[in-house]
Image (tube, rainbow, N blue to C red):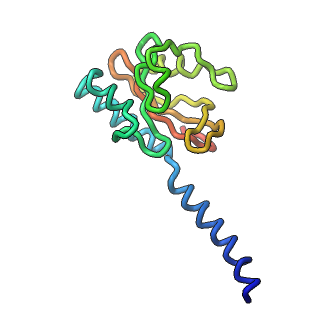
Amino acid sequence: MRRLLPLLLVPGLALLLAAAWATGQATQDDAKAMAIKAATYLTSVGPEKAFPEFNAKDGPWHDRELYVVALDGNGVMVVNGALPGMIGKPMLTLKDVNGKEFNREMVEIKEQGWVRFTWRNPLTNAMQLKAQYMVRVGEYVVGVGAYVDKPAD
């Protein structure tokens, strides 16, 4: 019986860990909700107050692998909750590993919508498909993305 117990525990533990990780990963619905919330906040308080709060690592705008990004109309990164070194830099021609200029697509959003590209997941450090929901707020587009296996429409 003592030899059988480890054989029974290992698969059970593996299933529990997999379930815990799956429930902890953000969804596209989570990303969309946070993007809309960030856009509403930006509209109500303006960029001078919202942008520093979006960038604050210990603030409410970080949840698991979710964080806020924003670009101005020229493609300059004005918010990046994960990579602050990108702030203030022109990002229009930045390409993902597949050669897609995803920031150009973001800047072209007229009202709101999804942009899909491949990016490094900050929790796993693996390159992964990311579905980012972007919302236009005046001269800015603000968004939040979730890492996914298959993007929803």
What quarter of the picture does the C terminus occupy? top right
The foreground one among 20 and 117 is: 20
Q: Is residue 37 left or right of residue 29?
A: left
Q: Residue at x 38, y 19 (%)?
A: 140
Horizontal arrangement in the rendering, residue 106 relative to residue 111 (left or right): right
Which quadrant holds residue 38?
top left
Q: Quadrant of residue 144?
A: top left
Point out the image quarter for the N terminus.
Answer: bottom right
Give me the residue at 37% from left, 40% from top: 58
- The vertical placement of 17 against 38, above or below, is below
Name of the residue lying farthest toward the right? 3
Percent coordinates x, y for residue 88 in the rendering:
44, 15
Judge from the rendering whether residue 138 lies leftward or rightward of residue 28; answer left or right: left
Residue 18 is situated, as x and y percent measured from the top left of the image, at 61, 60
Judged left or right of residue 4, residue 26 is: left
Quick one: which residue is furthest to the bottom in this view? 1
Q: Position of residue 64 (x, y in %)?
A: 47, 46
Query: Where's residue 14, x and y in %?
Result: 65, 65
Q: Residue at coordinates 56% horizontally, 55% vertically from top-left?
A: 22
Q: Residue at x 71, y 78 (%)?
A: 6
Report the label total: 0
Q: Residue furthest left?
A: 44
